[in-house]
Amino acid sequence: MNNQICNRNIRLLNIFTMCVNAVFCLPIILPFYQDHLGLTFHDFLIGESVFAAMMILLDVPTGWLADQWGRKKTLISGAFVFGLGILALYYSIGFWTVILAQGVVGIGSSLMTGANSALLYDSLLAAKREAEFRQKEGFRFAL
């Protein structure tokens, strides 16, 4: 892989990161839970716990999937599942649909985490620029 392809992958990964992190519904999710669904802050925290549990439980299996299936396919799948989860949150009608939606968002997030860092490292390694990984990864986290 030459530097041009490596730079393209880094640029696309940065754009992908910005798009995933630009989840504009997050600042309004608690008022949505309270006003539209009648859920409490405790219910909100249970939903967030389901999200976190999915992330923890699926971290290793989704990393293995990214190794077997490919980083880009896993990232695309993760973004798709993440989007479905956000859409499911929008159409939630009560506590259990929120729990289900939070689980789907957790699955999507789990598919994306790790695969994005691995894709960055693989791109830099192929261009013999792996020493730049920490700097590029730090920049990506800042996005």
Image (spheres, helix red, strand yellow):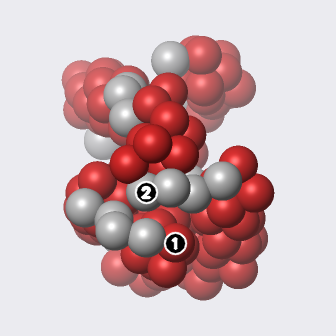
Q: Is residue 131 above or below residue 56?
A: above
Q: Is residue 71 above or below residue 143?
A: below
**Cα–Cα gap, marks 1 and 2:** 8 Å
Q: Nearer the viewer, residue 141 or 101?
A: 101
Which element is circle 2 on? loop
Residue at 52% over, 72% down:
95
Along the horizontal axis of the image, is 130 left or right of 75?
Answer: right
Q: If you read the primary sequence from the N terminus, does the residue marked by circle 1 or circle 2 appear first?
A: 2
User: Quick check: can you spot residue 124?
Assistant: no
Q: Which residue does the numbered mark 2 point to in the structure image?
A: 37
Q: Is residue 16 above or below residue 95?
A: above
Residue at 38% over, 48% down:
36
Q: Amino acid at mark 2?
A: Leu
Q: How would you rate the neighbour count of disc 2 (Cα within 10 Å): few for under 14, some for 14-19, many for 20 or more?
A: some
Q: Which mark is residue 16?
A: none
Task: Look at the image and tell me in which quarter the N terminus lies.
Answer: top left
Q: Is residue 143 above or below residue 127?
A: above
Q: Are marks 1 and 2 in contact (CB under 8 Å)?
A: yes
Along the horizontal axis of the image, is 134 left or right of 38?
Answer: right
Q: Quadrant of residue 86?
A: bottom left
Q: Nearer the viewer, residue 114 or 94?
A: 94
Q: Quadrant of residue 49?
A: bottom right
Residue at 36% over, 58% down:
89
Residue 103, image x and y in percent? 52, 73
Give the mark count: 2
Residue 47, image x and y in percent? 62, 64
Q: Quadrant of residue 108?
A: bottom left
Residue at 34% over, 68% down:
93
Which element is circle 1 on? helix
Q: Which residue does the numbered mark 1 point to in the structure image?
A: 95
Q: Amino acid at mark 1?
A: Phe
Along the horizontal axis of the image, is 58 left or right of 71?
Answer: right
